Amino acid sequence: MQPIGVAAAITPWNFPVAMITRKAGAALAAGCPIVVKPAPETPLSALALARLAEEAGVPAGVFQVVIGDAIELSKPLLRDPRIRALSFTGSTDVGRLLLEGAADTVKKVSLELGGHAPFVVFDDVDLDKAVKGAMAAKFATSGQDCLAANRIYVQRGIYDAFVNAFAAAIEQLKIGHGLDPLTDIGPMTKLSVAEKCRAQIDDAVRRGARAISAAQGADLCSLFVAPTLLWDVTEDMLIAKEETFGPVAAVLPFDTEEEVVTRSNANEMGLAGYVYTDNLRRALRVSELMECGMVGVNTASFTGPPIPFGGWKQSGLGREGSRHGLAEFMEMKYVCFGDLAA
């Protein structure tokens, strides 16, 4: 294995330091210089990392940061044949465009794209444990996370009890300034995200879902979305078909294991999934059958440096983290020797 050469990384605004270090750390460890194009919403995190790299003695030019318009800066990174690898985290729509743009120079591309995570709760599990897991998987970072639970499937035997306990927990969430340590739910980073959340709520209610908000009647600016529970959601509703990326929780009932596996997989996204059950055989079966790159069983926390992070289907290509993350910045070479002259 040898370093592939100069790499480029295009990173999103959420987790701005982690997104860069996960890519740059692997590239540098593999022996590749890297050019980072951070999200325009969070440029200062990238510039701070560049300063820290300089202070740590990283040679000039080995870790570079370019700031500016995403489209204009991405074009030369894609066209330049000296850049041999591209790593991107962001939406599936943008990932498709970058994959197409990288084709002209046949770059090695790794993509961590959108998610639409199923969160499956079986009726053999402790209710409090399932509710606590759903709260963490749905509302961390105000729901603006590709790993966020998007479709919460609850077996009918505990469906009503789960909805009641989940609603009570959601009503305790505090909305406020993002820098207030007591705040649970801050503003959405983009108005378009907030509008998408409201559109999904309106669509679900119009189609028969029931809704309860943690801040009904609160005077919030347009960037805020009150944490909202939708239950009796059906598969034809927008929130069941597309990623939310906000603090709106959709709960859907199911009857059988086979049924919920089929419904969980009936989507082109496959980043992560969650399974809550106290039956080990069931946990192994369902996690094996889920068509996604990562599965958390009775936990909402399963990422970190040793974890091969990435998805299946249209949720991405390749992996970040672990030893597998190094492979995205390396080329395999086979050398065969014949006889050597004495």
Image: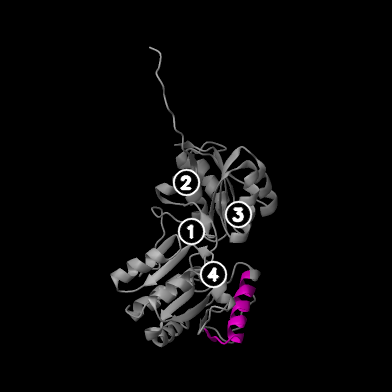
Q: Which span of residues is magenta-colored? A: 193-213
Q: Earlier in the sequence, mark 2 or mark 4?
A: 2
Disc 1 is placed on an element classified as: loop
Q: Are marks 4 and 3 in contact (CB under 8 Å)?
A: no
**Disc 2 marks which amino acid?**
Gly
Work out whether residue 129 or residue 152 is closer to the camera in this orientation and state it: 152
Q: Are marks 3 and 1 in contact (CB under 8 Å)?
A: no
Q: From this viewpoint, which residue is outermost toward the top?
A: 342
Can you identify the residue that label 3 sits on?
43
Of marks 4 and 1, the one in the foreground: 1
**Disc 3/disc 1 C-alpha distance (Å):** 26 Å
**Disc 2/disc 3 C-alpha distance (Å):** 18 Å
Work out whether residue 293 or residue 191 is closer to the camera in this orientation and state it: 293
Work out whether residue 279 or residue 35 is closer to the camera in this orientation and state it: 279
Magenta segment includes 204: yes
Vertical placement of 90 versus 84: above or below?
Answer: below
**Disc 3 marks which amino acid?**
Pro
Disc 2 is placed on an element classified as: helix
Can you identify the residue that label 2 sits on?
25
Magenta segment includes 340: no
Quarter occupied by residue 225: bottom right
Q: Earlier in the sequence, mark 4 or mark 1?
A: 4
**Disc 4/disc 1 C-alpha distance (Å):** 29 Å
Can you identify the residue that label 1 sits on?
311
Of marks 2 and 4, the one in the foreground: 2
